[in-house]
Amino acid sequence: MKSLNVSLGERAYPIRIGAGLLRQSSLILPHLPIPRAVIVTNVTVAPLYLEALSAPLRAAGAEITEIVLPDGEQHKNGETLNRIFDTLLAERCDRSTTIIALGGGVVGDLAGFAAATYQRGVPFIQIPTTLLAQVDSSVGGKTGINHPRGKNMIGAFWQPKLVLADTDTLHSLPQHELSAGLAEIIKYGLIRDLPFLEWLETSMDKLLARDGAALAHAIECSCANKAAMVAADEHETAQQDGRALLNLGHTFGHAIETGMGYGEWLHGEAVAAGMVMAAELSHRLGWLAAADVLRVRRLLERAGLPVRGAPLGVQRYLELMGHDKKNVAGRLRLVLLKHLGVAVTHADAPAAEIAAAIEACCRG
């Protein structure tokens, strides 16, 4: 088992990475204020891992309630959130009851937002079962739901007490979901860790083959990078760069997810296409060489990811990007690349160049 720590003072918490961890109740029980928990999962994950998690906890004396939600990004909304609240209220859960998220990013975001807001905050544990959730959404405390006008526009920062990344769960992932997780892993190399990016270029075949050691290393490096950025800028308030750099490709990608309809593109797929757009715009601003853009495209293609944007039309992209949370005073604030391994936030890109980059990445 590999262990990391998210350094947030009194709210610091561990990240545990390894095989078979969700069956080890001894890793979870110390983080329950009382031996009572509500496990939130979905119809896809429940048959695979719910009993493996809940049975050892019950055997150790914990009272467990289970909530099984529908699966898919299209269900990350207020209606599904209220299903969690209905159960918490029906079961008379109090502020000492811990909510455990067992699933991918949608489950984690929903359960985390419920934890942040139920009785003004209850303890929360993340047990992510997808690669994307293990390297990104489970770490850092961002929770929320989608709105028809924009992704993740309603939410709260609420840090978990523990993140338990069981690598055994990755064996049941469909290949396209594994690839979606690789998009977020590649992101860390692009924004701040060139040696890791170079390692990914030489290790991609092992990752696609689900080599255990390679996956564990990629998860550890990704979580270490994110933990450092979260500790330095927890609420994404730094005026220059900070945690916002984690959003490379996301402004473009969220436009794809919203414009195509939630669930049509996986989050990681949309982010991959968005990172190509960000790289293309960085090239047009004179920061990246054409060879660098090609290098980004080739690595994403090797990971099984799309490198061409959805055919929404430039104006629709710009309209949807206008709702992005990073925008300042009505100006698009984009995460771009000064060099491979060095990202910046930039609010002065000419509109014509943004439009040209989008168009170039959506053509044939």
Image (cartoon, rainbow, N blue to C red):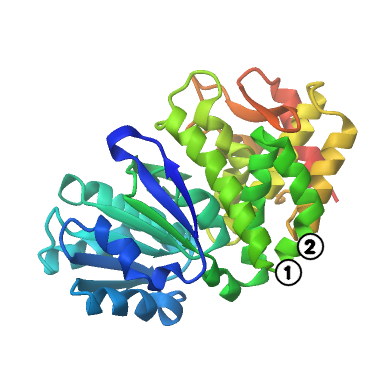
Vertical arrangement, residue 43 with respect to residue 313, above or below: below
Proximity of marks 1 and 2: CB atoms separated by less than 8 Å: yes
Q: What x and y, as percent, mark residue 226? A: 52, 40
Q: Which mark is residue 297?
A: none
Q: Could you tell me if residue 109 is visible in this image?
A: yes
Tag 1: amino acid: Ala
Q: Quadrant of residue 43?
A: bottom left
Vertical arrangement, residue 151 with respect to residue 22, above or below: above
Q: What x and y, as percent, mark residue 197? A: 74, 43
> Pointer 1: what residue?
209
Circle count: 2
Tag 2: amino acid: Asp
Helix, strand or loop status at disc 2: helix
- Distance CA(mark 1)–CA(mark 2): 6 Å
In-front residue for pair 94/219: 219
Check disc 2: other Cα within 10 Å, few if <14, some if 14-19, many if 20+. Answer: some
Q: Residue at x 26, y 58 (%)?
A: 30
Residue 256 located left or right of residue 43: right
Check disc 1: other Cα within 10 Å, few if <14, some if 14-19, many if 20+. Answer: few
Q: What x and y, as percent, mark residue 274? A: 68, 43
Vertical arrangement, residue 227 with respect to residue 1, above or below: above
Residue 14 located left or right of residue 209: left
Q: Residue furthest right?
A: 291
Helix, strand or loop status at disc 1: loop
Q: Residue at x 27, y 73 (%)?
A: 57
Q: Residue at x 40, y 31 (%)?
A: 235
Q: Which mark is residue 205?
A: 2
In-front residue for pair 192/25: 25
In-front residue for pair 101/117: 101
Vertical arrangement, residue 276 with respect to residue 112, above or below: above
Q: What x and y, as percent, mark residue 192? A: 65, 33
Q: Residue at x 15, y 55 (%)?
A: 96
